[in-house]
Image (cartoon, helix red, strand yellow):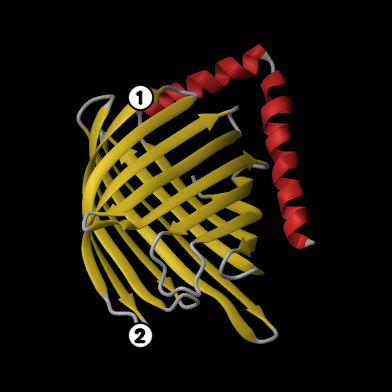
């Protein structure tokens, strides 16, 4: 029941953003364009804290608590960003979900279209007996679109992956490739859609690969408060054991606060 309510809310907000916000006046659109251009040329800062209820399907069909943090600072062609998530859920005093993950990414722009990046990630998942998955990689990015309203970037790189498992599965260390897509579209000064998707194949064998997709709608309400809807899909082509499903899906509905 709760899962259906989250999906319905997601659809309602999506329709509101797509069909209602575009009817804003021409004057409001012009103001938005000026503000967007100023942010592109100057410093770009973000410090967003999110608190949500989450409906999870896949290995754990449950409702859980989600907290997330997204930090970003860019200036003079250099940028650094961090985002971290924590999921926690219980049912009848039994742990169902306890997952924490974080990623740190630094980038340097050569010009308006070309850039290079360094990316590090960490993940801990008690339900899947994953003590720690860590990676460090480097890559190249190209911005196909970059203006006040819209940005689309493609990324490709390589990295070193390490996996520390609990139970009978042996720890694993290998080199992996990375193909990423980052897309952001601003409907107005207060509403935007963003997606970050990546394909991570092991260079030792195509069977061991992971796919991650994150889709986010953000609508600012009052000053720095915002309503946030997320959908995260995690696909693991080589799970810990046969009893573990390949795909986990999480739908979030909550509020956020941006300190800038």
Residue 172 lies, in percent from the top left, at: 25, 72
Residue 233 seen in the figure: yes
Dot 1 or dot 2: first in sequence order is 1
Query: Could you tell me which residue is drawn at 62 percent across and 55 percent down?
Result: 251
Compared with residue 25, is residue 219 higher up or lower down, i.e. above or below?
below
Residue plotted at (68% across, 37% down): 14
Can you identify the residue that label 1 sits on? 144
Residue 221 in picture, x, y percent from top left: 67, 41
Question: Between 220 and 142, which is closer to the camera in this rendering?
Answer: 142
Q: Is residue 43 left or right of residue 30?
A: left
Q: How far across and down, in percent of the image, does residue 33 sit? A: 51, 19
Res 181 quadrant in image: top left
- Residue bearing the label numbered 2: 168
Rounded to the nearest angstrom, the CA distance separating label 1 from label 2 is 45 Å
State the SS at label 2. Answer: loop
Closest to the camera, between mark 1 and mark 2, is: 2
Residue at 67% in and 29% down: 18
In the drawing, what numbered circle is on residue 211?
A: none
Extreme-right residue of the structure: 1
Circle 1 packing at 10 Å, graded few (<14), some (14-19), many (20+), is few
Tell me if label 1 and label 2 are in contact, CB under 8 Å. no
In-image side of 157 versus 83 (left or right): left
255 left or right of 47 in image: right
Could you say which quadrant of the image residue 173 lies in? bottom left
Q: Nearer the viewer, residue 77 or 205?
A: 205
**Nearer to the camera, 169 or 7:** 169
> Circle 1 sits in a helix, a strand or a loop, which is it?
strand
In this view, 111 is above or below 125: above
Identity of the residue drawn at 27% across and 61% down:
135
């Amino acid at each position: 029941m709760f899962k259906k309510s989250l999906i319905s809310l997601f659809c309602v907000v999506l329709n509101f953003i797509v069909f209602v916000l575009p009817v804003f006046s021409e004057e409001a659109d012009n103001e938005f364009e000026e503000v967007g251009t100023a942010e592109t040329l100057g410093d770009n800062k973000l410090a967003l804290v999110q608190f949500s209820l989450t409906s999870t399907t896949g290995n754990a069909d449950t409702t859980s608590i989600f907290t997330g943090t997204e930090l970003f600072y860019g200036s003079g062609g250099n940028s650094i960003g961090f985002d971290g998530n924590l999921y926690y859920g219980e049912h009848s005093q039994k742990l169902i979900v306890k997952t924490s993950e974080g990623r740190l990414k630094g980038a340097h722009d050569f010009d308006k279209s070309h850039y290079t990046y360094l990316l590090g990630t960490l993940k801990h998942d008690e339900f899947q007996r994953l003590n720690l998955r860590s990676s460090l990689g480097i890559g190249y990015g190209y911005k196909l679109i970059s203006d006040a309203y819209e940005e689309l970037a493609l990324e490709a790189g390589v990295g070193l992956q390490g996996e520390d498992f609990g139970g009978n599965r042996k720890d694993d260390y290998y080199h992996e490739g990375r193909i990423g897509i980052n897309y952001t579209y601003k409907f107005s000064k207060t509403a935007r859609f963003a997606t970050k998707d990546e394909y991570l194949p092991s260079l030792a064998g195509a069977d061991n690969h992971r796919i991650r997709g994150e889709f986010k709608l953000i609508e600012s309400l009052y000053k720095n408060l915002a309503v946030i809807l997320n959908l995260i899909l995690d696909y693991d082509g080589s799970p810990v054991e046969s009893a573990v499903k390949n795909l986990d899906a999480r739908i979030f509905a909550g509020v956020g606060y941006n300190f800038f």
